[in-house]
Amino acid sequence: MIHIAYLIDTWVWIEHYEGRSQRARESIEGNEILCVSAVNIAEIAQRYAKEGKPVVAARINDVLRRATVIPVDTMIASMAGMMRNQEIYGGIADAIILATARIGNHTIVTGDQHFRDLPEVVFIGHTEK
């Protein structure tokens, strides 16, 4: 498989924004081509909603500045539904992210345990700042 881009999972964005992971910062600020699933945008909005619309807008605008957003189409949705609880045991959002990566030949960058042992994943986990 030819790697096209890094699909940066929500876990990495949050670690970066909250200053908890040097590796998250390096993944986002490095020289790789970045993408996200539209699901990641929803998760980021959900995570920062309690901080208000200006914070949500700032986070999403930052993601849009750095990464290409891949919409969820019927191919991704169908594959995700078939993989959930067979290849990935997180929620349907995790399955959609995995399907997005597989269909687009992207490598997922994350610290989310649901992705830990999958071949198309760079697992960064928690690290010191």
Image (cartoon, grey):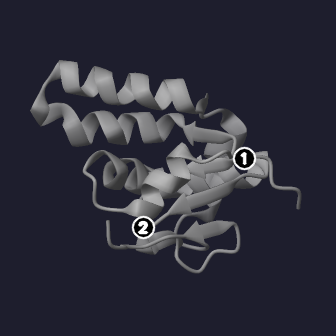
Q: Residue at x 69, y 41 (%)?
A: 33
- 79 with respect to 63 (left or right): right
Question: Closer to the N terminus: mark 2 or mark 1?
Answer: 1
Classify residue 38 as left or right of residue 56.
right
Q: Position of residue 101 (x, y in %)?
A: 68, 52
Res 72 quadrant in image:
top right
Is 119 situated above or below 81? below
Residue sitting at x 72%, y 40%: 75
- Residue 71 seen from this side: no
Instruction: Tell me: 69 left or right of 47.
Output: right
Residue 21 seen in the current view: yes
Write down the quadrant of residue 1 in the picture: bottom right
At 33% from the left and 30% from the top, the residue drawn is 59
| Relative horizontal placement of residue 17, taking residue 115 as reference (left or right) | left
For the residues labelled 2 and 1, say whether their Cβ atoms are less than 8 Å apart: no
At a point 33% along the width and 39% down the height, the residue shown is 44
Say above or below: 78 vs 45. Answer: below
Tag 2: amino acid: Asp
Between 39 and 2, the one nearer to me in the picture = 2
The image shows residue 88 at horizontal and vertical percentages of: 54, 70
Amino acid carrying mark 1 in the image: Ala
Task: Specify the farthest residue to the right.
Answer: 1
Mark 1 sits on what residue?
Answer: 5
Across and down, in percent, residue 113 comes to 43, 74
Q: Is residue 18 above or below residue 44?
A: below
Query: In the rendered image, which residue does mark 2 sit on?
Result: 112
Alpha carbon separation for disc pair 2 and 1: 19 Å
Dot 1: few (<14), some (14–19), or many (≥20) neighbours within 10 Å?
some
Q: Tell me which corner region of the image, top left, top right, bottom left or bottom right, holds residue 45.
A: top left
